[in-house]
Amino acid sequence: MSPDSQAASSSPDAIEALIQRCLQGDQIAWDLIVRQYWRKVFNVAYKFVGKHDEAEDLTQDIFLKIFKSLDTFDRRANFQTWLISVSRNLCIDHYRSVRKERETIDRDVDANELTPASHEPGPVAALEQRDRVMLLRQAMAELPDTLRTAVMMRDIQELSYQEIADRLRLPEGTVKSRINRGRTELARQIRKLRGEDFSPSGAMSKRTGAY
């Protein structure tokens, strides 16, 4: 490890040197900055979302956006102050985006869209289908906003990973992680609501994936 990694925490000159290296494409320098400030940014994110895994996702997204805007940092300012300010603004943007997405889902998604209609069901099957739809709605309501949005966009709206990444302005890897965690949590909530008699071979599991 280079000496500037040790000096980064206390020396503005060291931070300046790391920033300059980052702007020249030095990945190691960026890793040092992330390691230095990860906990501070995470604490800001956690105050907004209140859950550890969501805060980690949000922190990762914040650092990605900070990296892309690093060239806008005024070198006369304090880097940590700028970093925290940008982080708070991005958290506010994230909160507004999630709230807007949730309002859109609540307004636009019909219960019939929560289950595939490959054929016209008979009376008994139709009743079972309505029960499954209600169950899925209840389970979906228990998911964190970020996970629910990702699952809805992938499994209900059937968007591609790239389309979801573009709409949410997130890395594709983060999108895939949220979808996987969302599906796992959704299955857990369904089992919790149904009890031990829940069968993963049901129509809802086919829609959201078997676990």
Image (cartoon, rainbow, N blue to C red):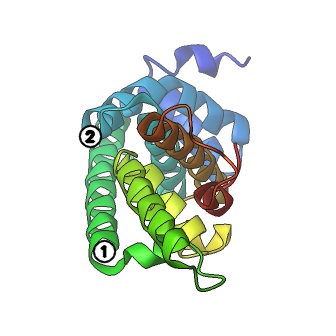
Determine which of the numbered discs, if any, sits on residue 83 in the image: none
**Residue 133's image quarter?**
bottom left
Q: Upstream in the sequence, badge 2 or badge 1?
A: 2
Residue 37 left/right relative to 178? left
Residue 138: percent from the left, percent from the top? 35, 52
Image point (46%, 18%), residue name: 9
**Residue 94's image quarter?**
bottom left
Q: Nearer the viewer, residue 93 or 116?
A: 116
**Placement of 131 over or under 30, stated as above or below:** below
Q: Secondary structure at mark 2?
A: helix
Q: Nearer the viewer, residue 88 or 82?
A: 88
Residue 120: percent from the left, percent from the top? 59, 86
Q: Nearer the viewer, residue 78 or 103?
A: 103
**Placement of 10 over or under 56, stated as above or below:** above
Q: Is residue 74 visible?
A: no
Q: Is residue 176 visible?
A: yes
Image quadrant in which the N terminus is located: top right
**Residue 27's image quarter?**
top right
Determine which of the numbered discs, if any, sits on residue 104 in the image: 1
Dot 1, crowdedness within 10 Å: few (<14), some or many (≥20)? few
Residue 6 left/right relative to 104? right
- The residue to which callout 2 is attached is 48
Image quadrant in which the C terminus is located: top right
Residue 81 left/right relative to 8? left
**Amino acid identity at mark 2:** Phe
**Amino acid identity at mark 1:** Thr
Mark 2 or 1: the one toward you: 1
